[in-house]
Image: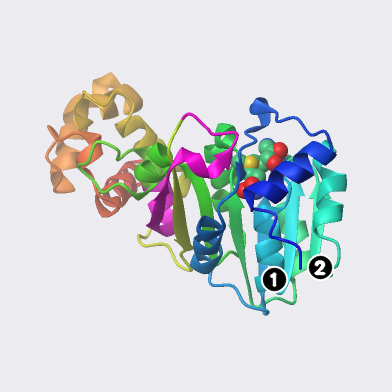
Amino acid sequence: SRPVVSSPKRTKEIIARHGFSFKKSLGQNFLIDHNILNKIVDAAELNEHKGALEIGPGIGALTEQLARTAGKVTAVEIDQRLIPILAEVLEGYENTEVVHGDVLKLDLQALFRERFGDMEGVSVVANLPYYVTTPILMKLLEERLPLEHIVVMIQKEVAERIAAAPGSKAYGSLSVAAQYYCEPRMVCIVPHTVFIPQPNVDSAVIRLAVRKTPPVELKDEEQFFRIVQGSFAQRRKTLANNLSALLGKDRREEINTLLTDCEIEPSRRGETLSLQEFARLSNAVVDKGW
Ligand code: SAM
């Protein structure tokens, strides 16, 4: 049987035969390490009753492994030049379809209904294009797609921010948002040598288990995220300072009282607040009608 797509030899052969040239602007770094691919697929806990949505299949290295593991696979690729290559590489995998398009513009709710309606669960599994990692993740989470896991290869720094604990340097609004929707776990750090072409940054595989119910009760989700954003607006400033910039300088005294009532010391910095503390604070702001 033919070697897997991810073998360096076959990858190079496919690329040469199709005269494919990499587009840096589309974040095209293809995986050529079978062990890493296995780790990604294993972390998604797929089986024949589960669906997988892949974003950015490239020449199909990961898609091929998903096709062998999941019940159904849909892979969304923006680059038209890759569509005929994918058709060739994935020939014979009846459970796998490729959609040509920009994942950020796609109606994913409709895709999930039509494509994965009969699956027991669906996960996103992808080696993401790094230039749009955060918009893609936020779209998947904010649209509240019925997802089980999101297992993605992303820039190591972004993975660290997503998984960061309060008080650490990497903790910020992305950590709070990701941890509100999911339970993150680092799967592995990946050296840049497992890609062609090699990216300039280190990568990591992260697994997000999407929560069925939120970890905190919010009176107003929009207000919660506004408070979180505002609390991190100027990282060197205290929480009280950041909040008065957000909620009104004339409310400075009231903000101090509110924080104390929430059992949050006003001199703390936003980056030390837990999800629970942000929830308490934003619910109190909602009660005030600010
Ligand atoms: N999955 C392949 C692999 O692991 O070898 C390729 C991963 S490569 C890092 C990212 C892929 O995402 C590229 O094939 C690129 O063309 C595609 N891509 C970039 N932006 C996209 C978008 N907005 N929507 C869908 N695919 C996109």
In front here: 121 or 46? 46
Estimate the x, y position of residue 254 in percent, counting from the top left: 20, 32
Q: Ligand 1 appears in which quadrant?
A: top right
In front here: 162 or 69? 69
Tell me the amino acid under the disc marked 2. Tyr
Q: Quick check: 256 left or right of 205?
A: left
- Residue 218 visible? The answer is no
Quarter of the image for residue 27 reads top right
Residue shown at the point (41%, 36%) measured from the top left: 226
In front here: 247 or 22? 22
- The magenta stretch is 176-200
In front here: 142 or 183? 183
Estimate the x, y position of residue 93 in percent, counting from the top left: 81, 68
> Which dot marks residue 68?
1
**Residue matched to label 2:** 93
Say whether mark 1 is within 8 Å of ligand 1.
no
In this rendering, the answer to whether 39 lies above or below 177 is below
Mark 2 or 1, nearer chain start: 1
Q: Quick check: 218 left or right of 54?
A: left
Quarter of the image for residue 111 reads bottom right
In this rendering, the answer to whether 237 lies above or below 224 is above
- For the C terminus, give its image quadrant: top left
- For the N terminus, give its image quadrant: bottom right
Measured Cα–Cα span from mark 2 to mark 1 = 8 Å
Residue shown at the point (16%, 33%) measured from the top left: 256
Q: Are marks 2 and 1 in contact (CB under 8 Å)?
A: yes
Q: Secondary structure at mark 1?
A: helix
- Residue 128 visible? The answer is yes
Estimate the x, y position of residue 165 in percent, counting from the top left: 26, 49
